[in-house]
Amino acid sequence: MIERSSPNHDARPAGTAIDMLILHYTGMRTAAEALDRLCDPAAKVSAHYLIDEGGAVARLVPEERRAWHAGVASWRGVTDINGRSIGIELANPGHQFGYRPFAEPQMAALVTLATGLVHTHGIAPRHVLGHSDVAPARKQDPGELFDWARLAHAGVGLWPAARPVTGEMGMVFRAGDGGSGVAALRAVLADFGYGVATGGPYDAELGAVVTAFQRHFRPGGCDGVADPETVQLVYAVLALAG
């Protein structure tokens, strides 16, 4: 492991346990460029670890310190995500600079690192998340090309099996829709952890949350429309989360 100290961290809140793992892509052209930025005091951003496409892992911030990686975010009613999480950056140009699949050596290194982290800190599978999960209105990373299934099969995070579509789960919900089906969708997404209001029609906020959910659990189609497959997966993920 490479040691490269970032100055961008502070103390975690007293008595706060580490119980979340947040994954990001760097969204920069090269890993070296990302590393420099994460260690630049003027940038005021950091993560605990950075993994380049060759699989090299750099430790930037001690785990006991609060790295500055999630920004304005929420999960299960908690807004200081940085205070209770470990942040891992994966070198990838991202949607702005030529988004591409994550390299095999990089994924292998992530599986090893993340497996150790969830074991050490007792991080529950439902708390292994992407930046887009905790900040759906602002972020897309690590995005639809990230292999969440592989990580879950290694014991890190969740990956649901498909279920038969029945009842309201056979309906399609999109912008402008209302009614009991939309209310139920909001409630289930909020119950799982997404920061979404539990009342109101299918608005832009709900569309952003559905898109974030799709990027994580249904990457083949990330359009913000709650089609039957998406809706059944929402219920399946909540059931799996326990």
Image (spheres, rainbow, N blue to C red):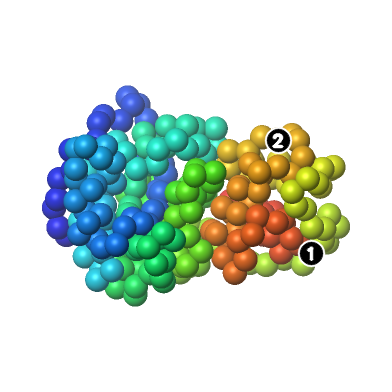
Residue type beneath disc 1: Val
Q: Would residue 63 be visible to someone looking at this image? A: no
Left/right placement of residue 186 relative to residue 31 reads: right
Residue 51 lies in quadrant: bottom left
- What residue appears at the point 76 percent right and 62 percent down from the top-left corner? 228
- The residue singled out by tag 1 in the image is 165
Across and down, in percent, residue 193 comes to 57, 42
* Residue 18 left/right relative to 169: left
Q: Amino acid at mark 2?
A: Thr
Residue 142, located in which quarter of the rendered image?
bottom left
Front-most of 20 and 54?
Answer: 54
Q: Secondary structure at mark 1?
A: loop
Q: Quadrant of the N terminus?
A: bottom left
Residue 21 visible within the image: yes
Q: Residue at x 37, y 37 (%)?
A: 82
Q: Label 1 crowding class (10 Å Cα cut-off): few <14, some 14-19, many 20+? A: some
Q: Is residue 160 left or right of residue 115?
A: right
In this rendering, the answer to whether 202 lies above or below 164 is above
Image spot of residue 226 (x, y percent): 72, 56
Looking at this view, name the residue that lies furthest to the top. Answer: 14
- Which of the two marks, 2 or 1, is nearer to us in this view? 2
Give the total of numbered labels.
2
Distance from the alpha carbon under mark 2 to that under mark 1? 23 Å
| Residue 177 location (% of width, % of height) | 80, 46
76 relative position to 37: left or right: right
- Circle 2 residues within 10 Å: few <14, some 14–19, many ≥20: some
User: Residue sitting at 39 percent across and 53 percent down?
Assistant: 24
Q: Secondary structure at mark 2?
A: loop
Vertical side of 148 occupied by 129: above or below: above
Residue named by callout 2? 198
Among numbered discs 2 and 1, the one appearing first in the sequence: 1
